[in-house]
Image (tube, grey):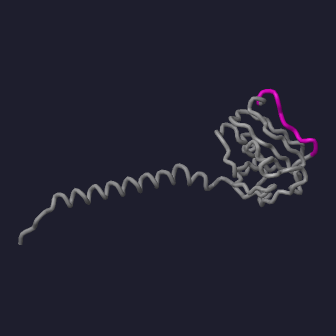
Amino acid sequence: MLMIFNRQSASGNLNTTLIISSVVLVVGSTFILWVLPNLYLPATSLWLGDGLFRTELALTDADRTNGLSNDTNLEADQALLMAFPTEGKWGIWMKDMNFPIDIVWLNADKKVIYIVKNASPEDSTTKTYVPTTVAKYVVELPAGTTEAKSISINNIALFQINSENIK
């Protein structure tokens, strides 16, 4: 029996195997390093004005204190929703912010009660934004969103969160 070994065929199979293995490694690493940790962030959808936003939730003191600090940007369809355990005049300080935002306060009925447009990181050392009446929720959006999505006083926000998780 005569066996003929095709060196070119073996080399081609090895290259194909290496390429496929590399792609699987890159996809797997991306999933483990980026997707998997973000699966555990509390999130919801938020409808406000004419906008629908993918919304990260800040339900604890630590998460609310951190807010968007040190983030580099917020996409046009993204928001941060801070939920507080009680109503109060919750102030927002732009500490360690890198970009301007619109800030929207909602009462316990999820009605818009106060808005600050284009809050600037340059004001971070001197200014705390505080609503004129008590609020239960604060929404942070990219600057210009309240104008672009027709968000105004008395609008009602639609979102669902488990109030048992607010601490």
Question: Could you say which is closer to the camera, residue 41 or residue 149?
Answer: 149
Q: Can residue 95 be seen in this view?
A: yes
Q: Residue furthest top?
A: 126
Q: Which residue is drawn at 38% across and 53% down?
A: 22
Residue 86, can we see it? no
**Placement of 147 over or under 97, stated as above or below:** below
Residue 104 is situated, as x and y percent measured from the top left of the image, at 83, 46
Residue extent of the magenta highlight = 124-133
The residue under the point 72% across, 55% down is 53
Viewer-side residue, 167 vs 93: 93
Residue at (82%, 30%) from the top-left corner? 127
Residue 24: image quadrant is: bottom left
Asked if residue 142 is among those painted magenta in the image, a careful observer would answer: no
Residue 48 versus residue 148: which sits nearer the camera?
148
The residue most toward the bottom is 1
| Quarter of the image where the N terminus is located | bottom left
Along the line of sight, the residue nearer the viewer: 120 or 134: 120
From the viewer's perspective, is 99 left or right of 150? left
Q: Residue 11 placed where, x, y %? A: 22, 56
The percent position of residue 60, horizontal first and vertical second, equals: 75, 47
Residue under the point 26% across and 57% down: 14
What main secondary structure does the magenta stretch of the protein show? loop
